[in-house]
Image (cartoon, rainbow, N blue to C red):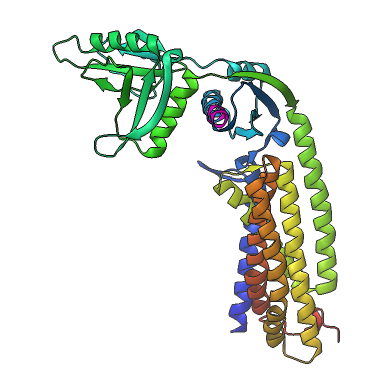
Amino acid sequence: MKGKETLLFFLIVAVIAGAVFVATNGVSLGAFELKSAGEMLNLGLDIEGGVVVVYEAKTEETGTDLERTMEQTKQVIGKRVNELGLTEPIITLQGENRIRIELPGVENPEDAIDVIGQTALLQFVLVTGDLPAMEGMDIAAIEYEPILTGTNVADAFVSQGQYNEPVVSLKFDAIGKELFFEGTSKAIDNPEKKGQIAIVLDQEIISAPYTEIVISDGEAYIQGSFTFDSANELALLIRGGALPVELEEIQTSVIGPTLGIDSLNSAINAALVGLALLVVYMLIYYRIPGFIATIALGLYGLIVIYAMIGFNATLTLPGVAGIVLSLGMAVDANVIIFERLKEEIHTGKSLRASINSGFHRGMRTIIDSNVTTFIAAIILFAFGEGPIKGFAVTLMIGIVSSMFTAVVVTKSLLKLSLGFSDRKKHYGSRG
């Protein structure tokens, strides 16, 4: 039995050590290649470099009207940012009339700012060629005839159709009413009595409904396989193009990638030095439990990093701080358990009984400290913005990982270690 425990112990240690090596360096075996964890992580603006722009809306609107206008503007800007091909853009509303845009990895900040600041161009066009329009197509791919622009749309909102399904309702101003009447008249002026009118935002077709009637009252609706969310999104885009708000650039910060990487490297080097000193201390003072804690901390790091990769989270410098803080909590949990273990050994109990009792006595303290910190992280995530959210996310992931490694992994490895050493002095006994 002891031989099997010993074999299993060293097998687990070897697997964790191998996984740490692969995560750190990556591996390449012929056609198979696994990137290192660092290459798979999304890096935040403060590490990768990029640009932060804060705009202020110049409008007299207040209350719910202002909220709606700002949400429309955010939707249009989000679409523009996505067209730039950037990864992990962060667009948030600040206060009542400001929008903050973070663009990691931007190589030409001026071009990005120019694209974001353009006024949205919304068009309704009559499809005249043989190729039908489809959502997501570039307008250059089809033949069309302009009908009206977004300035002629008075409102767009979600309502219910004949069978209570969500539809997007449109209302045009006086000029738009006449133009849409003419457009729908042309649309059905064919043997099929049916025509397609495409809605185009910034040269991209966002909807392509058909009409079989002439619309003369200045009101129309778009019917399709909508959910409420998808219908609301389309209405927001149409309103955003129809009701553009003037944006004034009030702050621009450009962060070079060299500065960001240097900051990350400094943080990592400081963490490695501290971790190395911690490992040496744990090995000298706690012996076998200290070695086991070191292995558990390696697994903790793997879980945190790959959890962030799996959640597609972005690593920022505040996020690194969250990881370091949760690492400290993982170490603290191990210290509490090992001190309880030493006390139990000192009372004369067997090693196995001391391990069970030490974990049982230490769990209440560990759970209390981790739960209260986790609640604080949830509050930070709920009410914070930008870097604060990044800190909260890594802290929450780190706390869950530290609880798992300190309680489950460390306890299991301690029991397995009894297969090759049952001498109390190897477990930091006082006696």
Residue 233 point in image, percent of width and height: 44, 32
Residue nearest the observer in this picture, 150 or 209:
150
Question: Most extreme residue toward the left, as rendered?
Answer: 191
Magenta span: predominant SS is: helix
**Which residue appears at 69% of the width and 20% of the height?**
249
Q: Which quadrant holds the N terminus? A: bottom right
Residue 201 point in image, percent of width and height: 44, 19
Residue 207 point in image, percent of width and height: 36, 24
Residue nearest the observer in this picture, 40 or 317:
317
Question: Most extreme residue toward the bottom, as rendered?
Answer: 348
Which image quarter: residue 146?
top left
Position of residue 18 relative to residue 224, above or below, is: below
Q: Is residue 68 magenta?
A: yes
Which image quarter: residue 64?
top right
Position of residue 7 relative to residue 155, above or below, is: below
Residue range in magenta is: 65-70
**Which residue appears at 73% of the width and 35% of the height?**
46
**Which residue appears at 48% of the width and 14% of the height?**
121
Say left or right for 328 vs 69: right
Residue 108 can be seen in this image = no
